[in-house]
């Protein structure tokens, strides 16, 4: 136990050092932070930042030695990265980051020393390494020393950036090709649970500037009702930028509609049998969310099956011989009964025709239906593969082009109070949802931007009302807040 003001004894082994570090952090994590004074809280925060930097430097040095000696092989792993993932129980991204710091600090020993002593934060160290990596290889060590000296002397990050630019200008070779990270550029999109994704990459300055402009333009708060975090707004801005690109028609083999939906239903649902009420909900998939069907191109696809009972009933009806007027099969028809017999036979033939028409689709549909049976029996190769759809209808727009144009001409811009997005960034929204019988009409639609349409209305539950005077009222999900537009829209010329 140390006396007040006395420095704790330095550890003499790695195990002792780790025990002391974990004990100190464990004490802070369990302490009542609210009982500390503001000065104590500030000291803790500053010390924790220094500890974070020291932790990264220490881990990088230990990991470098562990990797060089092949210590991961003792546990049956093929690399230090996989060892970290499985033994330390960290994600792929975290393991990649640890290996990246290991390699980066090995190339920048002065930065590693500064982090180990807590003189520079982890985030600033990363930025300094990125800047000096742009210098000629034989000048990077000197660049690290110069930038570290300026940082510990009190220079701000912006000042360090300007100093790094000056160093690069002074040290650049006459034939510098201005690579600007072009060789190391890359982007990786990994699909995770249920279609979610993880995006990681190294961007060139030009790509960074373009993406920053997109996020800044589309990631702003949409109003006081917008409670998304900065990260969520940037995510939605990237999605919105991709949506606008797709809708613009500039991508190969893409139409101009913002969403394409396949509405898949069974034949029983199409014919109004049990389960028909669920047919329209069957289109939903991982790429479509609430509200995406408000303005979409929908392609209906009908699938069916073979019902042996129908085949038996149809065969029995077709094989049953017609009865004569005397009641005996095959007996001659008496002249006096010719009229009645003809009428009866006509009714019987009509009934058979109706039965054939009602059962024909069931007979032909599905992977074991008549069409598939003939095709797979006669053809070979890929043409003989089994096909499930019975019918695929033509693409039909939820909102006709002329009506969409009328909504744009009337509204001129988004209609959610306080939002200022142009028509190109908006969707026509059904005020009374189509699922509740709302018509696709000019009086039941208005323009909403992507955020207010897909998130605020269809996910958060904000209500939208269009008054007879042309003004709009937006109501929060709990009904405690109401937002009003300033007045009716300008009348279209």
Image (cartoon, helix red, strand yellow):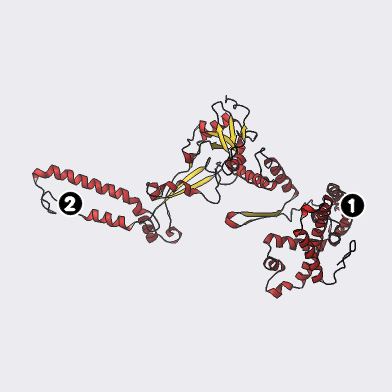
The residue singled out by tag 2 in the image is 322
How many C-alpha atoms fall within 10 Å of the one at disc 1: few (<14), some, or many (≥20)?
A: some
- Residue 292 visible from this viewpoint: yes
In the picture, measured across the screen, residue 111 lies left or right of residue 461, that is right
Q: Determine the CA span between mark 2 and mark 1.
A: 106 Å
Q: Secondary structure at mark 2?
A: loop
In the picture, measured across the screen, residue 10 lies left or right of residue 339, that is right
Q: Residue 422 location in percent, x, y?
A: 63, 35
Q: Residue 110 location in percent, x, y?
A: 86, 60
Q: Residue 176 or 489: which is nearer the viewer? A: 489
How many C-alpha atoms fall within 10 Å of the one at disc 2: few (<14), some, or many (≥20)?
A: some
The residue singled out by tag 1 in the image is 150
Q: Residue 43 or 262: which is nearer the viewer? A: 43
Q: Quadrant of residue 201?
A: bottom right
Q: Secondary structure at mark 1?
A: helix
At a point 89% along the width and 52% down the height, the residue shown is: 150
Q: Residue 87 location in percent, x, y?
A: 69, 68
Q: How many marks can you see? A: 2
Quadrant housing the N terminus = bottom right
At a point 43% along the width and 49% down the height, the residue shown is: 265
Q: Which mark is residue 207?
A: none
In the picture, measured across the screen, residue 334 lies left or right of residue 481, that is left
Q: Is residue 117 above or below residue 237?
A: below
Q: Residue 460 or 93: which is nearer the viewer? A: 460
Between tags 2 and 1, which lies in front?
1
- Residue 121 visible from this viewpoint: no
Quadrant housing the C terminus = top right
Q: Residue 44 location in percent, x, y?
A: 82, 55
At a point 76% along the width and 62% down the height, the residue shown is: 26
Disc 2 + disc 1, Cβ < 8 Å: no
In the picture, measured across the screen, residue 204 lies left or right of residue 308, that is right
């Amino acid at each position: 136990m140390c006396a007040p003001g006395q420095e704790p004894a330095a550890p003499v082994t790695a195990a002792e050092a780790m025990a002391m570090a974990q004990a100190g952090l464990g004490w802070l994590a369990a302490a009542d932070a609210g009982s500390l004074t503001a000065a104590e809280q500030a000291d803790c925060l500053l010390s924790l930042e220094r500890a974070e930097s020291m932790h990264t430097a220490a881990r990088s040095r230990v990991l470098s030695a562990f990797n060089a000696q092949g210590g991961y092989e003792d546990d049956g792993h093929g690399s230090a990265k996989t060892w970290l993932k499985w033994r330390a129980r960290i994600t792929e991204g975290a393991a990649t980051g640890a290996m990246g710091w290991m390699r980066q600090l090995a190339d920048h020993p002065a930065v590693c020393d500064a982090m180990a002593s807590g003189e520079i934060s982890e985030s600033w160290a990363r930025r300094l390494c990125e800047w000096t990596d742009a210098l000629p290889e034989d000048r990077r060590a000197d660049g690290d020393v110069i930038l570290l000296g300026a940082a510990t002397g009190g220079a701000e990050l912006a000042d360090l950036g300007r100093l790094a630019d000056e160093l690069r200008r002074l040290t650049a070779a006459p034939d510098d090709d201005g690579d600007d990270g072009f060789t190391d550029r890359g982007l990786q999109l990994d699909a995770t649970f249920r279609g979610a994704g993880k995006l990681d990459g190294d961007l060139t300055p030009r790509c960074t500037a373009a993406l920053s402009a997109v996020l800044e333009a589309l990631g702003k708060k949409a109003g006081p009702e917008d409670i998304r975090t900065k990260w969520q707004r940037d995510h939605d801005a990237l999605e919105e930028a991709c949506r606008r690109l797709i809708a613009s028609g500039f991508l190969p083999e893409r139409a101009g509609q913002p969403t394409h939906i396949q509405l898949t239903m069974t034949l029983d649902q199409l014919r109004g049998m049990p389960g028909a009420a669920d047919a329209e909900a069957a289109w939903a998939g991982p790429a479509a969310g609430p509200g995406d069907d408000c303005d979409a191109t929908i392609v209906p696809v009908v699938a069916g099956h073979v019902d042996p009972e129908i085949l038996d009933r149809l065969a029995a009806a077709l094989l049953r011989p017609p009865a004569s007027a005397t009641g005996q099969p095959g007996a001659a028809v008496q002249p006096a009964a010719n009229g009645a017999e003809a009428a009866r036979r006509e009714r019987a033939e009509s009934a058979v025709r109706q039965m054939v028409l009602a059962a024909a689709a069931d007979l032909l549909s599905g992977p074991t239906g008549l069409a598939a049976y003939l095709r797979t029996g006669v053809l070979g190769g890929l043409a003989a593969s089994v096909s499930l759809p019975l019918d695929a209808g033509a693409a039909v727009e939820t909102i006709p082009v002329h009506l969409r144009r009328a909504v744009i001409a009337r509204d001129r811009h988004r209609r959610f109070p306080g939002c200022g997005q142009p028509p190109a960034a908006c969707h026509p929204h059904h005020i009374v949802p189509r699922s509740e019988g709302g018509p696709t009409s000019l009086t039941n639609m208005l323009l909403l931007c992507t955020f207010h349409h897909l998130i605020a209305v269809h996910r958060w539950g904000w209500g939208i009302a269009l008054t007879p005077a042309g003004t709009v009222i937006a109501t929060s999900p709990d009904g405690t807040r109401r937002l009003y537009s300033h007045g009716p829209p300008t009348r279209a010329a």
